[in-house]
Image (cartoon, helix red, strand yellow):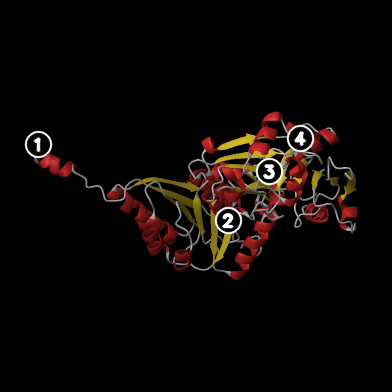
Amino acid sequence: MQEIKISIVGLGATEAAQLSDSALSVLLEAQMVLGSKRQLKIVEHLLSEAQITPLLPKLDVLSTVLEQYYNQGVRSVVVLASGDPLYYGIGTWFSRHFSAEKLTFYPAVSSIQEVCHRLGLSLQNVDVLSLHGRPVGKLRRKLRDNQTLLVLTDRQSTPQILANELVEAGFYQAKITVCEALGYRYEEVSVYDVKSLLRNPKTFDPLHISVLETGKSVKPLPLFPGFADHHFFTDGSQSRKMITKAQVRLAVLSLLQPQPGDIIYDIGAGCGSVSIELNYWCEEAKVFAIEKNQQRYDCILLNQKKFGLVTNLHPVQGSAPGILAKLPKPNKIFIGGSDGMLPQLLERLWSQLEIGGQIVATAVLENTKHHLVDFLNARNARGDAKVVSQQIAISHSDYLAGQLVYRQALPVSVFSFIKTSATPVINLKPILGDHT
């Protein structure tokens, strides 16, 4: 589609289109105008019978539809948007699929701006979350004390459903302002406390935004890395709970440095504390929490829901290495448990890693540490890795005869291996020495 020109035109958050002269000009001259039923109705009085006006198809077939019309001679297309096409709008999809030379954007006042102006909110002081076409569980990831959060919604995130999420997260005093059909003659702005909204049977207009004022939660989530252990659902008593403890978890996080686009395995994930924090602080990384034990796997699911990690955290029930064949290839791996398969697991994962890939592993038992030291020695001999190792020993406060004492926990050894070459590097020094 070398010659196609696509204009994405925002209509504004009103019943009548708010079009600049340039936006109106491209709309009148376009061969085809795409939009929702509501959007096409708003501009129908401006369009001619010669213009093609199909409903906007689903995004997974949009490229095919545009190509079909291109093959029929269509060279200029207008795509209708609600307000600002590049702020939680369809413009983002077009920017990913077409070059900038083919695209022109004509923004209007967005529904988010309209809500802020109507309620006297400074846009820079509010957070925005789109749940349109997204799991409502994402809300948990965004909630903070004393926060104003604007939520774009759909049928799966009605005000009543949002109220339920707030109550479950401990925001019992939260309020929700529902702004329905702003800019239309029948617009309505209503304020509810969350508990009363749960009992309210009202069906809200599909065209609405919910504004959440959270207040304070009685079950606050942490705000910085190194979540206290008590925040996690676990599988047993204080002495047996299967999570990587906060101090060690911080060391693992600092070594792995999760980044957008990473594919990370957490093997032997236990109850999922490392996976949770990896994904909580980097939502754009894909994290696979691999755990065979049913009870611990169930805890991963509970922690996933609690922290709102419903997009890129993938709990996987099964044993490594067998289950790994079904997963995408990782570039970073954490091994917290191996079920006695550590030497085989290390060799297999290392051989499959690309240059720059990383394995981080922890050991408490001497046998586990022995395997990791052997692997470290092999890497040093072959010269194919950057190796870092550290031992973490923590003493926790206690009282004896009413006096403060410290009791030392078992030390944990942490190993990091970053792959630097794909083939062994031969040490030439002895050979050179023979010839000097």
- Residue 160 position in % (x across, y down): 83, 55
Q: Label 3, on which residue?
A: 80
Along the polypeptide, which appears first: circle 3 or circle 4? 4
**Callout 4: SS:** loop
Along the polypeptide, which appears first: circle 2 or circle 1? 2
Q: Nearer the viewer, residue 265 or 229?
A: 265
* Three-letter residue code for mark 3: Leu
* Three-letter residue code for mark 4: Gln
Q: Label 4, on which residue?
A: 18
- Distance from disc 2 to disc 3, alpha carbons, whole Å, reads 17 Å
Along the polypeptide, which appears first: circle 3 or circle 1? 3
Q: Label 2, on which residue?
A: 61
- Distance from disc 2 to disc 4, alpha carbons, whole Å, reads 29 Å
- Mark number displayed over residue 150: none
Q: Label 1, on which residue?
A: 436
- Distance from disc 3 to disc 4, alpha carbons, whole Å, reads 12 Å
Query: Can the viewer see residue 394?
Result: no
* Three-letter residue code for mark 2: Val
